[in-house]
Image (tube, rainbow, N blue to C red):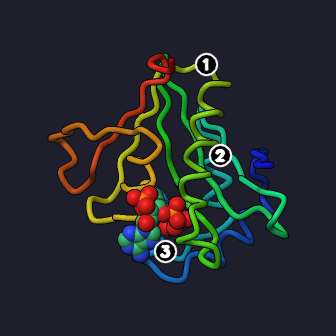
Amino acid sequence: MVVTRPARARDYARLLEWVPDAPALYLFAGPSVTWPPTVAQFEEISRRPGLSAWMVAHDEYPAAWGHFDLTVGGASARLGRVIVDPRYRGQGLGHVLTRAVIEKARELGVDEVRLAVVADNEPAVRAYRRAGFTEFVDPERPQFTAMTYRLLERP
Ligand SMILES: CC(C)(COP(=O)(O)OP(=O)(O)OC[C@H]1O[C@@H](n2cnc3c(N)ncnc32)[C@H](O)[C@@H]1OP(=O)(O)O)[C@@H](O)C(=O)NCCC(=O)NCCS
């Protein structure tokens, strides 16, 4: 069973081991965190208005293997800081995590989830597409692929 629980400071201490260098940090967190990443930077992000940060775990894995956060503003939430433990990438967990994102957004009561992903981050774009996110044009941020998921469209 997939479990989504609030992220805590000690999760970030472990999560930082998943980020080997500045390019990997940028894929994960964009410009929101600067190299070298620290737990304090993530704690500061977690205090942003409307933001909730989550760890994703699964019976078959010894510890939580994924992280994301959602920032609610009005009827929409912005997805950020998505990562899967590098030991387990390429096994479909990106897809599992994206489904957990949608469930959490539903619990938070929003109509839409938006995100911006570095344009050539193929595993991320593919995982989002597979979960039902669609691309839209954001002319202000051409270096990112903007994507949206409408929760109201569930059958
Ligand atoms: C992006 C990320 C969360 C995806 O997690 P994952 O467990 O590797 O993803 P999955 O195994 O579910 O694979 C997702 C898709 O990417 C594809 N994929 C996996 N590894 C790939 C690679 N190295 N190159 C290209 N495509 C790849 C898979 O085939 C799958 O596509 P499909 O659904 O069309 O078959 C993970 O790679 C990660 O943590 N990356 C570093 C941080 C990051 O980039 N975060 C995104 C911020 S927006």
Q: Secondary structure at mark 2?
A: helix
- 73 or 102: nearer the viewer: 102
Q: Earlier in the sequence, mark 3 or mark 1?
A: 3
Q: Return the x and y of residue 108 as percentages of the image width and height.
A: 64, 24
Q: Which residue is mark 1?
A: 109
Tell me if residue 37 comes above or below residue 83 in the rendering.
below
Q: Is residue 74 visible?
A: no
Nearer the observer, disc 3 or disc 1?
A: 1
Query: Along the horizontal axis of the image, is 36 left or right of 52?
Result: left
Q: Secondary structure at mark 1?
A: loop
**Residue at image location 50% in from the left, 21% down from the top:** 154
Q: Badge 1, how many Cα within 10 Å: few under 14, some, many 20+?
A: some
How far apart, in angstroms, are the residues tagged by discs 3 and 2? 18 Å
On the image, which quarter does residue 10 sit in? bottom right
Q: Earlier in the sequence, mark 1 or mark 2?
A: 2
Q: Which residue is mark 2?
A: 46
Q: Is residue 130 visible?
A: yes
Q: Badge 2, how many Cα within 10 Å: few under 14, some, many 20+?
A: some
How far apart, in angstroms, are the residues tagged by discs 3 and 1? 34 Å
Query: Along the horizontal axis of the image, is 9 left or right of 139?
Result: right
- 100 or 49: nearer the viewer: 100
| Ligand 1 is within 8 Å of the C-beta of the residue at disc 2 | no
Q: Badge 3, how many Cα within 10 Å: few under 14, some, many 20+?
A: few
Tell me if residue 112 comes above or below residue 44 in the rendering.
above
Q: Which residue is mark 3?
A: 35
Three-letter amino acid code at the position of disc 2: Ser
Q: Return the x and y of residue 92 as percentages of the image width and height.
A: 56, 62
